[in-house]
Image (tube, helix red, strand yellow):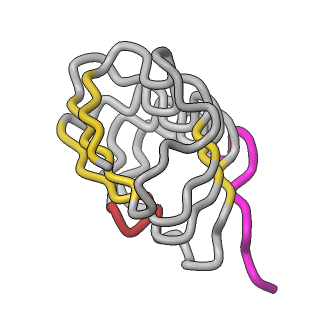
């Protein structure tokens, strides 16, 4: 069976979770999927084929301080998908276009640097 989605709240509140290997077949990360996973290390390869990152997917992942992401296939990023106080997130879109859902509040309380 091929995994294509990480559903809403799948790992929510797993405070001891440090690593997750996400198959390249995953295209959808649901809301709150990794919410409050305070020990999780973010691996940029997580997002290789992801098309949708839902609202609050990585909220309160306090182990993320500086994140450098290239979102190759992202077409939707939900509100406050990476709402992490004090984090700096550098986002580049390989197609140069901001995805649907990109708005002033998608990042919440962190700093976002956008590079087309």
Q: Name the spot of residue 69 as percent of width and height, x first.
A: 32, 54
Q: Residue furthest right?
A: 1
Relative vertical location of residue 36 with respect to residue 22 in this rendering, above or below: above
The majority secondary structure of the magenta stretch comes to loop
Q: Name the spot of residue 34 as percent of width and height, x first.
A: 54, 41
Q: Which residues are magenta?
A: 1-10
Q: Nearer the viewer, residue 10 or 109?
A: 109
Q: Nearer the viewer, residue 93 or 28?
A: 93
Q: Is residue 52 left or right of residue 41?
A: right
- Tell me which corner region of the image, top left, top right, bottom left or bottom right, holds residue 37: top left
Residue found 58% across the figure and 39% down from its top: 77
Relative vertical location of residue 79 with respect to residue 45 in this rendering, above or below: above
Was residue 9 drawn as part of the magenta stretch in this picture? yes
Q: Name the spot of residue 1 as percent of width and height, x first.
A: 81, 86
Relative vertical location of residue 18 with respect to residue 72 in this rendering, above or below: above
- Tell me which corner region of the image, top left, top right, bottom left or bottom right, holds residue 82: top left
- Tell me which corner region of the image, top left, top right, bottom left or bottom right, holds residue 27: bottom right
């Amino acid at each position: 069976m091929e995994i294509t989605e990480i559903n809403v709240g799948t790992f929510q509140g797993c405070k001891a979770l440090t690593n997750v290997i996400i198959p390249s077949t995953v295209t959808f990360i649901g809301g709150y999927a990794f919410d409050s996973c305070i020990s999780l290390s973010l691996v940029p390869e997580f997002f290789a084929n992801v098309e949708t990152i839902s609202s609050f997917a990585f909220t309160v992942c306090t182990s993320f301080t500086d994140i450098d992401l290239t979102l190759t296939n992202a077409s939707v990023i939900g509100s406050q998908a990476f709402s992490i106080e004090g984090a700096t997130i550098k986002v580049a879109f390989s197609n140069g276009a901001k995805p649907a859902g990109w708005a002033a509040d998608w990042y919440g309380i962190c700093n976002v640097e956008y590079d087309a």
